[in-house]
Amino acid sequence: MSAAEDGLPDAEGAEATQNAQKDSLKFENDLSHAVIGAAVEVQRVLGTGLLESAYAAALAIELGEREIGFERDVAVPAMYRGRPLGVAYRADFIVEHALIVEVKAVDATAEIHRSQLLSYLRLANMKLGLLINFYAFPVVKSIHRVVNKL
């Protein structure tokens, strides 16, 4: 009789799940580093002071040149008590189906921006998001990693 048949935890299955989670976390971390590198390059070329839409367009070009898969302006639906609400928000970028990227060009990001990104992550059932503010120089000082503990 196997451990699963006895109602006991399956050690091999648990280990496989832990390994898959570690691999997923490494992938998401590597992906976030690649996106941050692309954002640094965008700001290096464009500087500060432009509209958010200019930075988003340039980031799309940079991600494409780096062969990082992404979708832009992605409609994310929501449900309430099992009923559809329609589109709850539009993600600036969803990168490799694993990372939400929100682009800003504001004097300073506020807690509301991080809270919104966390809500987006929950609705999309994703773990990691980046809030990138191109107004700040250097841009790396104004990148916030937001984690959804699913």
Image (cartoon, rainbow, N blue to C red):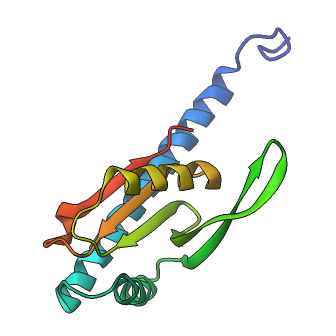
Q: Residue at x 80, y 11 (%)?
A: 7
Q: Count numbered badges in the picture.
A: 0
Residue 12 horizontal side relative to residue 1, left or right = left
Residue 83 horizontal side relative to residue 88, left or right = right
Front one among 72 and 113? 113
Residue 71 horizontal side relative to residue 137, left or right = right
Quadrant including the C terminus: top right
| Image coords of residue 146 (percent x, y) | 40, 50
Q: Quadrant of residue 72?
A: bottom right
Q: Quadrant of residue 58?
A: bottom left
| Image coords of residue 66 (percent x, y) | 40, 83
| Image coords of residue 103 (percent x, y) | 38, 72
Front one among 137 and 107? 107
Q: Residue at x 44, y 67 (%)?
A: 101
Q: Residue at x 58, y 29 (%)?
A: 15
Q: Quadrant of residue 3?
A: top right
Q: Is residue 46 above or below residue 72?
A: below
Q: Is residue 36 above or below residue 53?
A: above
Q: Residue at x 81, y 15 (%)?
A: 2
Residue 10 horizontal side relative to residue 31, left or right = right
Front one among 12 and 125? 125
Residue that lies at the very extreme toward the left in this rendered image: 137
Quadrant including the N terminus: top right
